[in-house]
Image: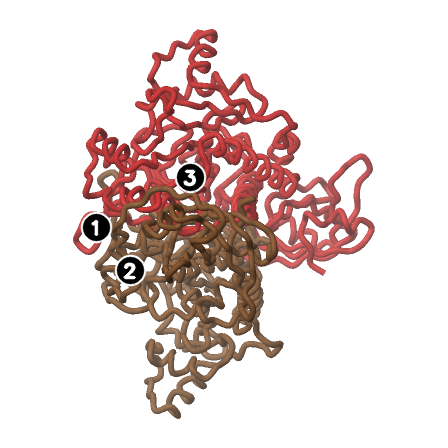
Chain colours: A red, B brown
């Protein structure tokens, strides 16, 4: 019976077959050690000349890396080790070219990204992508359980969500169209029909700057809720993050450990996530020697300096209106402030931006005008405030940013199967 | 306590509050009937002048449609009816403009699509969108449970998946790029890393023809599996469809009934889905008076004529090679035929296309050349056959097409929040 490498531990003392690809091999005299990779992980095959016979032993030593293999043998757990191995009895192999290009030696990122279609097979990359899959599933499972309806926003749009810069332009049967940066505005239409909606889809930003945390095409999960204010929004985000990370920690324990991440570090204690006001944040940063003029957004370095002091995610709340988007609801107690928050991951920085949306028609209209946006373009969005407008809030979480935190990735390019950056759209 | 309209039946004889929007109203002398819509459905509020007092009664009669309302009262089930109603005791209402544009009278599709951001609130549209959400969740839940890893393929790509026609071109920092038609080729890279992968994302086709079953932007779920051949692929599709539709039938029973669809019609008996060979299909169609020359693809009308004779989904298998894409595996017994299948929904037509992919490097290379495609563009795709190529298969299901079947929709534009067609990208 063919089983996955992760189930080998259930078969210690018995026979099993594994099916996958040859990741690495090493011969030491009369014994060869092969590593097999399947869709769930890797396992070591111990191949003894005495057990296999000369011909089979020589044949397996000659196997090219990445050859498809079907290995059968006895499952045993060597003393003092926690991963079982397979003492090989029989091996079937398929063909593979002998010049597999990705070696053990250190390759530069360009070399690897050029071969991303092959690099994803590296056990570290495969582990990251499995964790990504788990993270995305945990998001939709939680939201579905909470009564949210999935609401796929269009990607091809006639106008910009938050202005016309940073947009990719498209030839739509001879007319200009733009790739959407965010599902939010459409999600706001969705809540009056479905109350609680979410999207999980690609978002596009034509930002030319090259950083460790930006992609031109990234995936975002964007929930939007009727009848929820900014404080309720943060409380919901906290429940969301806790549930999602707990599920990922359970489901991908082995992969996290393989990456050197303690799964327990994704499960947080009972103390609520701290909520810091923007003004408090400026004071904290000032004590760290970082002066941010009031009204400015935090830089990546500010966020990192701030996030270094926390062991759980935390919120920065009530940003100045001028560093948030046009649709935010101002604080009735101080209209210079927005009922808007970021959630920062410990040691990293922003993973979620969210807030309460302006619900009053005339106020929103004045904001559109102030921001120099077209009233015609946003007529449909203003309609949402003409008819049955209610208090509502929502947020957007970047899947790749969250994955950087979960996996402890230095660079965001490893957080998505095929990263798109200003320099790269291939393969 | 505020509950959803769908939970009213649990509270018969007690008090409850409902929160939502005013869908319709009708006054008959001393009684007014309001319909409230929330995120899960609708409920009737019975408002008696005697119980509410003159002032409150007149005020609620004057409410504009779509006003946000919070209604409290006694839940009762009138004799001979199966939907409980709320005998109103108290009503709070928010503002809404008096000129709600969508009336009961028949509007044309252009009028409605122009106001799609508001039309989605219509109870029928909201029901369809909830079923869509359930369908998408059922797909990912089933695949996750079956050990598939989500693998998000890039949308911005340097080349065409199946040729350069029908592609939207994009300005990518001054270079041409294209919106992806399918995740499949990338998913094929994914299987050598993760064995079983799937994507759920937007797909783009720049097809100018206007039909009841095409969108320029649609959502597809695309699973891809290592170690599975064409026959195993069909068997898996059958399990997938059965599980997904059963879940949708359970989860959205009320919405399906509201649309006039019997939820039981989505739950199929134990007989396996029929598998018809292409050649048999031509004979069948010929008996129906429809002559299809051998080697031609089936037209929409052919599919509809064929699908009218089935009560469950069924497969058409072994299409001629010339009507399938370049990457298909030919039938070793007859290389004119492809190990490729469509799955058709009863009474409708194609909902899934799938097949076994060519796994031999040299054969695939010859197919790329024959199709006039660039070997440079597909060098990375050929690499997948150079290194560790295995038998593999996959399929793509259009969410909107499946939803047309599930909901019994005549036109595909109702199957997605904001349909994109050659004429329409707004709102």
Q: CA distance from mark 3 to mark 2?
A: 55 Å
The residue identified by callout 3 is: A113
Q: From this viewpoint, is residue B372 visible?
A: yes
Disc ID at residue A19: none
Q: Identify whether B99 is placed above or below B401.
A: above
Foreground: A286 or B167? A286
Q: Nearer the viewer, mark 3 or mark 1?
A: 1
The quarter of the picture where the N terminus of chain A appears is bottom right
Q: Circle 2 is placed at which residue position?
A: B103
Residue at figure coordinates x 63%, y 45% from the top left: A41
Q: In this picture, is A363 found above or below B99?
A: above
Residue beneath the point at 40% across and 33% down: A356
Q: Residue furthest left?
A: A174
- Nearest the camera: B330 or A318? A318
**Image position of A5 with respect to A374: above or below:** below
N-terminal of the pair, mark 3 or mark 1, is 3
Task: Name the mark nearer the viewer: 3 or 2.
Answer: 2
Q: Quadrant of residue A165?
A: top left
Rounded to the nearest angstrom, the CA distance separating label 2 from label 1 is 36 Å
Q: Are marks 2 and 1 on the same chain?
A: no
Image coordinates of residue B147 in percent, x first then y, are: 60, 54
Report the residue at 62% width, 76% height from top.
B270
């Amino acid at each position: 019976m063919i089983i996955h490498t992760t189930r080998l531990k259930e078969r210690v003392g018995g026979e099993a077959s594994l099916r996958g690809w040859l990741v690495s091999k090493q011969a030491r005299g009369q014994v060869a050690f092969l590593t097999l990779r399947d869709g769930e992980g890797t396992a070591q095959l111990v191949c003894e000349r005495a057990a296999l016979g000369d011909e089979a032993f020589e044949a397996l030593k000659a196997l090219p890396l990445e050859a498809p293999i079907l290995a059968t043998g006895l499952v045993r757990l060597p003393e003092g080790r926690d991963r079982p191995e397979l003492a090989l009895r029989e091996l079937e192999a398929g063909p593979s070219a002998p010049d597999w290009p990705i070696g053990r030696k250190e390759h530069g990122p360009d070399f690897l990204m050029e071969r991303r279609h092959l690099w994803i097979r590296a056990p570290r990359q495969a582990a990251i992508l499995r964790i990504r899959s788990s993270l995305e599933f945990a998001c939709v499972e939680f939201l579905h359980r909470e009564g949210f309806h999935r609401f796929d926003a269009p990607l091809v749009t006639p106008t910009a969500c938050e202005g016309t810069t940073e947009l990719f332009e498209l030839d739509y049967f001879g007319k200009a169209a733009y790739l959407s940066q965010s599902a939010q505005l459409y999600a706001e239409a969705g809540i009056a029909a479905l109350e609680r909606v979410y999207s999980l889809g690609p978002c596009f930003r034509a930002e030319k700057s090259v950083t460790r945390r930006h992609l031109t095409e990234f995936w975002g999960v964007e929930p939007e809720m009727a009848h929820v204010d900014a404080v309720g929004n943060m409380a919901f985000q906290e429940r969301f993050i806790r549930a999602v990370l707990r599920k990922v920690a359970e489901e991908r324990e082995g992969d996290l450990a393989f990456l050197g991440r303690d799964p327990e570090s994704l499960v947080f204690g009972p103390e609520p996530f701290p909520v810091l006001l923007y003004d408090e944040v400026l004071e904290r940063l000032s004590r760290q020697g970082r002066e941010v003029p009031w009204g400015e957004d935090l830089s990546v370095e500010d966020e990192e300096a701030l996030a270094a002091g926390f062991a759980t995610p935390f919120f920065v709340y009530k940003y100045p209106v001028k560093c948030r988007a046009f649709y935010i609801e101002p604080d009735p107690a101080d209209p210079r402030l927005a009922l808007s928050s970021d959630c920062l991951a410990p040691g990293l920085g922003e993973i979620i931006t969210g807030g309460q949306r302006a619900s009053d028609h005339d106020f929103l209209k004045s904001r559109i005008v102030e921001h120099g946006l077209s009233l015609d373009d946003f007529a449909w969005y203003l309609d949402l405030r003409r008819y049955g407008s209610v208090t509502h809030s929502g947020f957007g979480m970047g899947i790749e940013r969250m994955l950087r935190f979960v996996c402890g990735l230095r660079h965001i390019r490893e957080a998505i199967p095929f990263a798109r950056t200003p320099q790269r759209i291939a393969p």
